[in-house]
Image: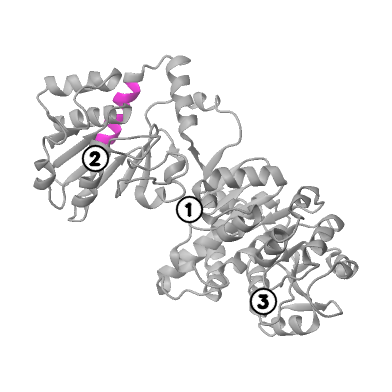
Amino acid sequence: MARRVVTSAEMRRLDEVTIGAFGIPAIALMENAGAAVARFALRRLSSRERRVLILCGPGNNGGDGLVAARHLSQAGAEVSILLTRGELKGEAGVNLAICRKLGLDARVWPEGRGRFEALCAGDLVIDAIFGTGLTRPPEGASRELIEAANAVRQRGVHILAVDLPSGVDGDSGQTPGVAVRADETIALALCKQGVATGPGVEFAGHVEVADISIPKAAQAELTGPTTSLLEEADARSLLPPRALDFHKGRAGHVVVLTGAPGKSGAAAMTALAALSSGAGLVTLVGREAEVAAARRWSPELMGAVIEGDGTLSPEDLPRLVELCAGKGALAVGPGLAVGAGTAEALSALMTAVRLPIVLDADALNALAQSDHLDELKRSLAPLVLTPHPKEMARLLRTTVAAVQADRVALARRFAMARGVTLILKGARSVVADKSGEVAINPTGNPGMATAGAGDVLTGCVAALCAQSLPPWSAARAATFAHGLSGDLTRERRGELGLTAGDLIDGLGLVWRRWKR
């Protein structure tokens, strides 16, 4: 099952239902959370190095840290506590009083500054300053504690964050001010969206989810579309099985539209990726010279010519419709080129054919430069869009920074408003469906930042659509497989210098790994 991730508001709702409807007291949830943190911390401490410094903020996150302090002390660890303030309210205040009665070393910052100076490699800092309730950049004592924690990490002190690294937004993963750079994060009950996407992924390090006894029935109270973190078993299960009498005609026929002089490689990469993703047949379609150039990349690629010169135009529609008849999917964008009539031709094509269409690169640029974006909603063809952040910014006529500010929310809104499946590429690509469902992809690495990598993804999506997968399923399976291809290839030859061709070869490693 895909691992569900939640927003801060959804987590607050779960807490409310657990406490109000099921009668589990808040202090019991805090006890469970702190005990889980302590168990996790003890696994990270060697028998020799058992010094732990716990940084506690004023809210429930700080209370979780105080519970962890008590359990760690009982287990024999040398525990010190630094607080952002001396008096705490509610359940956190109760646990602070318990720690003081037990004689634990709990000091208010900046008193106890020397505790940081005493730490060395192998010791542990637990960050329990802020959780999902953070609404502004850390300041004052909180900011100073975060900066001190990051400083000792440079000399080998291990940092464990409780629920979220302090300073990371629980929804977007953005860090508007300073933020803890954790080695590990223990997410309480469910993974928070802010450590599944955006910069929060890097700040969180390895994320592990701990059960704190929130009833599964409480999740039923969360209404609306869900967000999940894709897992390999989920992606693998989406692939269609193949019987012994399977043949190329049943494997789907992908059409790849080309057209830009000097960019035949982009269309060829898309076509080859489609073949490497199981398509039985792939045909390159475009002007004669461009089709001939792209076909030189491989003898398996077929070609069909659209007579005439220049970029795609509405006059080409009858021939395009003819060539799409009986095919399984159409990939448009890589190596396309944009002209005055390109957007109009694409808009007409989307209402003239019913096979799935994957739009990338120049197809997206053509739509962005025109007034045809609203026509996505009127498409008779199921659509999958695969923009990178800059292309997404062009589509929305905004900035890359605005796109990256909250990738999940933006992708969901766009997919629902336009009636499409959207793959917003980048670190932790976001796959959004027109239903509002969102999946975050954990695979991929910086080595994939190379020319043609996106073309490979386009071909993979098109091939899976041609094999009768619904666009939402094809997009999730292809995105995971594409990233995993990069990860498996990195293991074999390193990260630096990966090429799109390596990713196509790597897809074979993925399918072999997923063979049933």
Res 480 quadrant in image:
bottom right
Secondary structure, mark 3, is helix
**Residue bearing the label numbered 3:** 268
- Where's the C terminus, which quadrant? bottom right
Residue type at the position of mark 2:
Ile
Q: CA distance from mark 1 to mark 3?
A: 27 Å
Say which mark, if any, is on residue 442. Answer: 1
Q: Is residue 347 above or below residue 108?
A: below
> What percent of the width, then of the height, locates residue 194?
44, 43
- Residue at 65% x, 65% y: name it: 361
**Residue bearing the label numbered 2:** 126
Whether residue 47 is visible here, answered yes or no, is yes
Residue type at the position of mark 3:
Ala
Q: CA distance from mark 1 to mark 2?
A: 25 Å
Secondary structure, mark 1, is loop
> What percent of the width, then of the height, locates residue 240?
67, 55
Q: Is residue 74 above or below residue 40?
A: above
Magenta-drawn stretch, dominant element (helix, strand or loop): helix
**Lateral position of residue 268 relative to residue 313, left or right:** left
Whether residue 2 is visible here, answered yes or no, is no
Q: Is residue 142 above or below residue 206?
A: above
Badge 2 density bin: few <14, some 14–19, many ≥20, Cα 10 Å: many
Residue type at the position of mark 1:
Pro
Secondary structure, mark 2, is strand
Query: Which region is colored magenta?
Result: 28-38
